[in-house]
Image: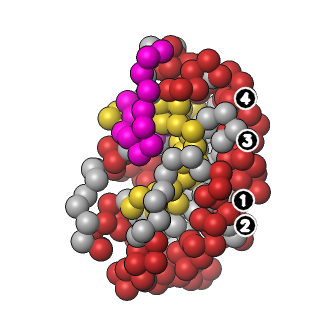
Amino acid sequence: MSKTFKPGEMLDIMFPSSHDLTPTNIECTSLKIRNLLAAGNTLLLVSKPHLSVISRLCEECAAYRALILFRFTIGSDDDGVLQYWEPNAPLFAERLASLELACKRYRTSISIEPALDLPNVERLIEKLEPHVTDTLWIGLMNRARNNVHPKTKRDVDELAKVLANQTPEQVTILYEKLKAHPKIQWKDSIREIVGLPACGKGTKEWARRSNKNCVLGCSHNCRYCYARQIIFNRTHRTDDWTTEKLLWDKAKKA
């Protein structure tokens, strides 16, 4: 296991990219992760973390921890905001506990993308940064009007709130406040607004490959889910996206 990586360095594989690591799929995803690591890949593990899942992975992958960077998605510290946009994902306390656990033995980073509560991102960073060994990435809710489909007045109001908070003016104010922070990185959705060169396209901002998924669907049921929209556009799948289909044949391969 001679391969190593530096903070902020692009890794070999981002996993997963179109689903999450959940108690429902952990048997399948854990197998996939261990196969990828055994093949010598550096691995970016991305999740809205369940504490039970992260605890298990920390134990099972201990021999490979030099190859792993956890990146936990935490878009707000407000449980009301999280519950609305990510109905079945863990609330803030559980995500923070997962981060605190992982950082004791592993390298850790944060994705604040989408930033669900942009005016309070500074407060969120203050809570997370002490447990982050690598970077904190900030990005906007991309293609919100295409991926979010309001059905009620509250849906309309919540979407309008996010869009109002991520105007170029608001984004520029946040950037000016945080641009000197040594751990903060900006996703292309923000870099474009403030005049920085692009990092990459989609998941290639973070890793060389991301097509290693072994689950179809995601029980978190995030209202802005791009993966669900992409699958629908391609296949017009109409069954329940929140029912996770385990693809064991893919899990068994590196």
Alpha carbon of mark 3 to alpha carbon of mark 2: how far?
A: 20 Å
- Along the line of sight, which residue is nearer the eye, 103 or 61? 103
Is the residue under label 1 in contact with that under label 2 (CB below 8 Å)?
yes
Magenta region, mostly helix, strand or loop? loop
* Tag 1 residue: 92
Nearer to us: label 3 or label 1:
3
Mark found first going from the N terminus, 3 or 2: 2
Are the residues flagged by discs 3 and 2 in contact, CB closer than 8 Å? no
Left or right for 62, reference 213? right
* Image quadrant assignment for residue 186: bottom left
Q: CA distance from mark 2 to mark 4?
A: 25 Å
Q: Residues within 10 Å of mark 2 (few under 14, many from 20)?
A: some
Left or right: where 228 falls relative to 74: left
Q: Residues within 10 Å of mark 4 (few under 14, many from 20)?
A: few
Q: Residue flagged by tag 1: what amino acid is it?
A: Phe
Question: Tag 4: residue type?
Answer: Arg
Q: Which mark is residue 56?
A: 4
In this rendering, which labeled residue sits more in front, label 3 or label 2? 3
Q: Which residue is mark 3?
A: 101
Count the marks: how many?
4
Name the secondary structure under disc 2. helix
Q: Amino acid at mark 3?
A: Leu
**Residue beneath the point at 57% across and 31% down:** 245
Q: Nearer the viewer, residue 36 or 211?
A: 36
Q: Earlier in the sequence, mark 3 or mark 4?
A: 4
In the image, what residue occupies the spot 63% across and 22% down? 61
